[in-house]
Amino acid sequence: MDPAELGSFLASRRARVRPADVGLPAGSRRRVPGLRRDEVARLAGASVEYYTELEQGKARHPSPQVLAALARALRLGADERDHLFLLAGHAPPSAGGTTHVQPAMLALLDRLGTTPARVVTDLEVTLAQNDMAEALLGDGGPRTWPAASFVHRWFTDPAARDVHPAEDHARHSRELTADLRAAVARRGHDAEADDLVTRLRTASAEFRALWDSGDVAVRRTVRKRIVHPSLGVVELDCQRLVSDDGRQRLLFFTAPPGSHAAGQLELLSVVGRQEMGTTPP
């Protein structure tokens, strides 16, 4: 590991990112090019003190999770992301890994400031989300494997189902399982996908029965009812855009103009998380 070179690289990438690139106001009193240290720290979910130490070459051995979060916050391309990992003394993530959001997905996410949106993998691991999604759905991560996958939490953690009304649970179970089967085949039964299926078959009789049915279907636009602790049930259309390789999806939630749900989203955009407690889905 080369702490000084790591810090220099982070500082150079930070100077390159414009506030508008990450959905932040430019302001009229900026004294530094690009982002401020506190803005990078907030985007990455790290403390300002820790990020400052990284740039100053004082912090050693940042974890892969921290590096992945910094790569997302700084909008690094795949080559830059790999270089960051190498400078920190870690092997770069594999090409099929679930830690790096594709730049095109992040660019779209940044432009959906008033629409709840998040980027997930085909194994339902949340990679990034905007403030509206956090206010609607709760904190999306990071979590360690296999709990990072919402499919795993759905079948193993009863609290994960609180995000949807009980009468919708059976449908979501079927859709999650059928979509996972399509993802496993598309990945060519790689180690990560097979590990998830093995764990779920062991942990959940419900999943095992659904998996053995052989049903397969890719989840596309669906109507979802989301239980929010302050807004009540919010009925939204979940739209999705899929990356070329099918491994990442940008999910965004919309409501028909003039509908009750549209009013709920408008209220959420004003109040956000300040007055509305949310629990992670």
Image (spheres, rainbow, N blue to C red):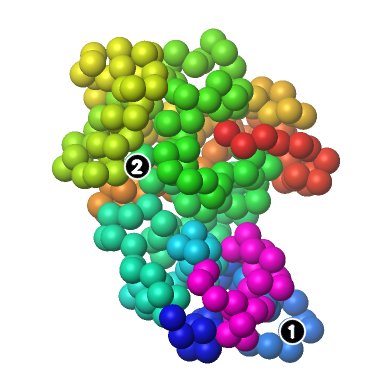
Q: Residue at x 64, y 64 (%)?
A: 46
Verify whether residue 61 appears in magenta: yes
Closest to the observer, 199 or 27: 199
Q: Disc 2 and disc 1: Cα gap in Å?
A: 39 Å
Residue 43: image quadrant is bottom right
Left or right of residue 88, residue 201 in this image: left
For marks 2 and 1, give the one nearer the viewer.
2
Task: Please give the label number shown on residue 122.
Answer: 2
| Percent x, y of residue 41 | 65, 68
Instruction: Answer with mark 2 or mark 1, whichever residue precedes in sequence.
Output: 1
The type of residue carrying mark 2 is Asp
The type of residue carrying mark 1 is Arg
The segment highlighted magenta reads 41-62
Q: Residue at x 47, y 24 (%)?
A: 156
| Mark 1: secondary structure | loop
Residue carrying label 1: 30
124 vs 154: above or below: below
* The C terminus, quarter of image: top right
Could one spot residue 241 in this view of the protein?
A: no
27 vs 226: above or below: below
124 vs 206: above or below: below
* The N terminus, quarter of image: bottom left
| Percent x, y of residue 119 | 46, 49
Closest to the observer, 277 or 31: 277
In the rendered image, the residue lying farthest to the right is 275
